[in-house]
Amino acid sequence: MLPPCNALGPPILLDQVMSSTRKLKASLAAAILVGAAAAVVSLLFAINGHTQDHHLAIGKSKPSLKAVPTVPCTYPATPVVGILTIPKLAMIAPVEQGTDDSVIGVAIGHNPATVWPGMPATSELSAHDVAQFWHIDQLIRGDEIDYYSPCESVAKFSVTTAKLYTVGESVWSLPQPGLIMETCWPANNLGVTDQRLLVDATLVSVTPDRNYPIPPPITPTPIVPAPPELAALGLNLNQNVQPMGFMHTGGNPSNTWLQSPAPMNAEASALQVWFGLLDAAARSRVDWWQDLAPSVALASPFLGQYVQRHLSRMDVTVIANGSDLQEVDLSTSLGFGSGNYSIVAHMVVKSDVMTLGSIDITPV
């Protein structure tokens, strides 16, 4: 998986009155009053930039006097611990415990330093900006959010506010039981960003509900037919240099497909093909090139040449029909020893296998 902005790091600090203190990595702070005795809980939400950690002062909120009924629940020791739905966006996605990349690469992550959604305090959920939370900027006051727990209950929330924060700013807990949804900003950003979009929602009710919704199946990640010798060189973004820009969409993709890990998985496969092609060309390995581009001749400007300059960020356009991925276009400008070029690589998908279908190269 390729994290677009490393939206969240591991869980952080939970420091509660009359309890032990567990110190971990921290960057975004809040304080929450919980329980009948209104014990003060200081918690830090982890929102890390790519290059450094950010430590913040603790903010405090007043206790809420509004009673919200809850359903007693013991959460299972399984990856999926709930389902989040946003009817307005036609979004339905699993929720898992944790906020590292292994979690939010496949699901919405629950910050373990916060309560579960539906409990009488503030809960925090996080997801990638080009995945489950791609469209949460479209939510307005009063829009409904539902969290289905494994205890056959549903917690209903109502959106109150949406705000942009810079990494390093303090974030206050909600004045009454509720939910904070966090993602990177801009919503289609693939590169480094210190901006975060936080959408707040107030808890309205918690009621029994046995109609546990089933998330759609995860679309298979396209297979990249790189030969083992080439793949061993490392074809992921964390093994290669490529400044990233923004993700765009084309065709007629379904909202369900867009608000899932599928677009990021498509991007990851396309980048593997791209880095494989650059390595094949630089090493004059025509056989490797043909494995990844069976119908495209090796581009002569790349032959025996390594990338010397990145003249622009790379934008990614995913083209799909419903949940059927058809093409991924990569657009960038690079400098080689032979000159500078504007490049658009068109990756096509057939039978879940991604290869280069065509490439446009223009001297600049």
Image (cartoon, grey):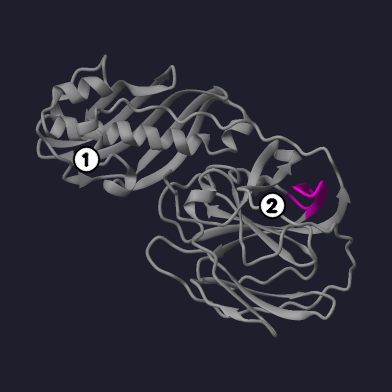
User: From the viewer's perspective, is residue 117 above or below residue 306?
Assistant: below
Q: Residue at x 70, y 45 (%)?
A: 84
Front residue (pair 83, 81): 81
Q: Residue at x 34, y 36 (%)?
A: 271
Instruction: Pinpoint residue 184: horizontal percent, then vertical percent.
Output: 53, 54
Side of 175 where 317 appears, left or right: left
In the rendered view of the protein, which quadrant contains the C terminus? top left
Instruction: Pinpoint residue 293: horizontal percent, then vertical percent.
Output: 26, 21
Q: Bounds of the magenta span?
A: 140-158
Front residue (pair 17, 346): 17
Marks 2, 1: nearer the viewer:
2
Q: Are marks 2 and 1 in contact (CB under 8 Å)?
A: no
Is 30 contained in the magenta span? no
* Quarter of the view holding residue 72: bottom right
Front residue (pair 143, 52): 52
Specify whether residue 55 is in view.
yes
Q: Residue furthest bottom?
A: 18
Q: Residue furthest front?
A: 77
Instruction: Pinpoint residue 103: horizontal percent, then vertical percent.
Output: 53, 50
The circle on residue 20 is none
To which residue does mark 2 refer?
76
Instruction: Pinpoint residue 247: horizontal percent, then vertical percent.
Output: 46, 39
Is 142 contained in the magenta span? yes
Amino acid of disc 2: Pro
To which residue does mark 1 refer?
233
In the rendered view of the protein, which quadrant contains the N terminus? top left
